[in-house]
Amino acid sequence: MRKLAAREESAMTAPDPRAVEAPSGIDAATSPLLRAAIWVAIGALIAAAIVCVVWVLTGTQNGIVGRAFLTILLLVGFSGAAILDAHLAPRRPAWFALASMAGWVVALLSGAILIWMPERYSWGGVSRLVQFLVIVLIIQLALLHIRLYMKAFQRYVTAFTQTIAIITIALVVGLAALLIVPLVSADYVTFSELYWRIVVAVTILAAVGTALVPLVNLLFAPKKTAVRGAAAQQSQELLPWPMYVDGVTPLPILPDGSPDWNAYYTGFPSPGAQVIGASAPEPAAVAPAVVEPAPFEAPGSTAPPAPAGYEGYPPPPPLPPRP
């Protein structure tokens, strides 16, 4: 009974080889962001569909088939852009993913208005298509500007640059809105000269704010080359100092700061080298070798073979001097 119970327990705890592991999806930290972006896309699709249906029921019959076809293309294109943004969201900052989705929502609503807005004189499909493409271009340029500007801002963050960045981003978003509104409602609204003066003024202020942050970085931000040089120097300092053959005693230091490699083979520091730790004794005077006469060998006798020794290789270096 105990064996049977143990087998049942192991069968319950052992993984099933036939089970298929769930694919590793989006990280838990980014899933709320993706859910929010997808819900924004769904809400925009529903809103655009309701607006188009209302115009179909209450508008004229002029060109309704062509407009319905363009509406389908618009909704399909927005769905594809929303799916692409959802897949790219884990590799983007959170604010940029939401801003990109909001930009596509603005493009969707602008396209629906341009398609179904009643014509004032005659429905100019080509001109409205060009207007829609210009709107998408303005939105994408504004997003690209903000993305690059935030990268430059994050290099050197101060209270001054933070204030300039907030004001500049607000000016860029306002400029994009000021340029999109005439493209959407130019057939029904006549914009005065003051409006375009405001557009030019906002453009100048946005350009000045865009140039300020890179200039501050050029003056005060740490240089990338200096940072790389410091990191390389730190890596060099962390390299281990070479040792004698015993693996414990470090080699002496030459006057130029390099290791005394000659001491590794001789066992004694070179002249002028500084010994690390304790001072090494001076090399002892070598006593003259005493030559002993060779032993007498009888004629016809053979000498024993010489020892193999190191077989032509030099002996290992001696140990370092000990105090």
Image (cartoon, rainbow, N blue to C red):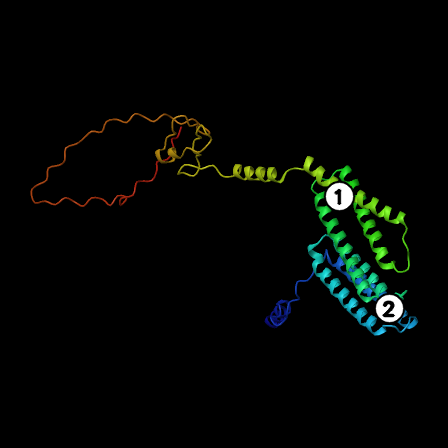
Residue at image coords 79%, 66%: 74
Badge 1 vs badge 2, beta-carbon distance below 8 Å: no
Q: Which disc, if any, is residue 95? A: none
Q: Nearer the viewer, residue 1 or 199?
A: 199
Residue 114: which quarter of the image? bottom right
Question: On the image, numbered disc 2 is attached to which residue?
Answer: 52
| Earlier residue among tags 1 and 2 | 2
Q: Find residue 316 and report its horizontal and vertical position in percent.
A: 33, 40
Residue at image coords 78%, 58%: 134
Q: Is residue 276 above or below residue 33?
A: above
Q: Is residue 5 left or right of residue 252?
A: right
Q: Is residue 134 above or below residue 259?
A: below
Residue at image coords 62%, 40%: 224
Question: On the image, numbered disc 1 is attached to which residue?
Answer: 210
Q: Secondary structure at mark 1?
A: helix
- Three-letter code for the amino acid on which mark 2 is drawn: Cys
- Three-letter code for the amino acid on which mark 1 is drawn: Thr
